[in-house]
Image (cartoon, rainbow, N blue to C red):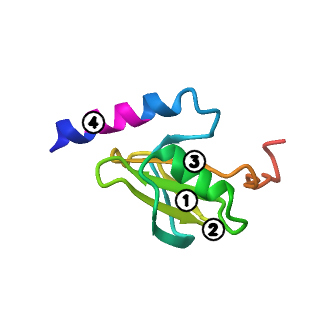
Amino acid sequence: ADTHMHASRERHLSAMATSGVHYERGVWTYGDYKHNYDADTPQACAAACASDEGCLHWNFHVVQHRCDLKSESSGHNADAPDWISGNSIRYKPPVRRGSDL
């Protein structure tokens, strides 16, 4: 099963490389908005998020072809090997304040 998952992830990551869409390995946690959105590819999942005003992040499961849309999300788990995720263009990362200026 791991071999299939890794092959699926690499295939989807390769397809995203020329998409012009923000993507990364891992999964956005919390901020549930819409589950099991009808999208068969990470590109379609990203496009669904881009066209939905309430969506800030998207998650795509590389084996189950599951697309979840997220609103405000407080964490990203880059160690989840079976997910690809990304940000909507309307997402603005939090501004850090204090000593790291």
**Nearer to the camera, 10 or 73:** 10
* Rendered residue at 59%/33% (across/down): 19
- Amino acid under disc 2: Ser
Q: Residues within 10 Å of mark 3 (few under 14, many from 20)?
A: many
Circles 4 and 1 in contact, beta carbons < 8 Å? no
- Dot in front, 3 or 1: 3
The picture places residue 17, in percent across and down from the top left corner, at 53, 28
The N terminus - image quarter: top left
Instruction: Report whether 51 appears left or right of 39.
Output: right
* Rendered residue at 36%/53% (across/down): 65
The residue segment tinted magenta is 6-12
The picture places residue 94, in percent across and down from the top left corner, at 75, 55
- Amino acid under disc 4: His
Q: Residues within 10 Å of mark 4 (few under 14, many from 20)?
A: some
* Rendered residue at 65%/64% (across/down): 55
Q: Which mark is residue 86?
A: 3
Q: How many numbered dots are placed on residues in this image?
A: 4
Residue linked to disc 4: 6
First along the sequence among labels 3 and 2: 2
Query: What secondary structure is marked by label 2?
Result: loop
Q: Which mark is residue 75?
A: 1
Query: What secondary structure is marked by label 4?
Result: helix
* Rendered residue at 82%/52% (across/down): 98
Q: Could you tell me how far apart the alpha carbons at marks 3 and 1 are, in whole angstroms?
A: 12 Å
Q: Which mark is residue 71?
A: 2
Q: Could you tell me how far apart the alpha carbons at marks 3 and 2 are, in whole angstroms?
A: 12 Å
Q: Residues within 10 Å of mark 1 (few under 14, many from 20)?
A: few
First along the sequence among labels 3 and 1: 1
Asked if the magenta segment contains residue 10, the reply would be yes
Q: Could you tell me how far apart the alpha carbons at marks 4 and 1 are, in whole angstroms?
A: 23 Å
Q: Could you tell me how far apart the alpha carbons at marks 2 and 4 are, in whole angstroms?
A: 28 Å
Query: What secondary structure is marked by label 3?
Result: strand
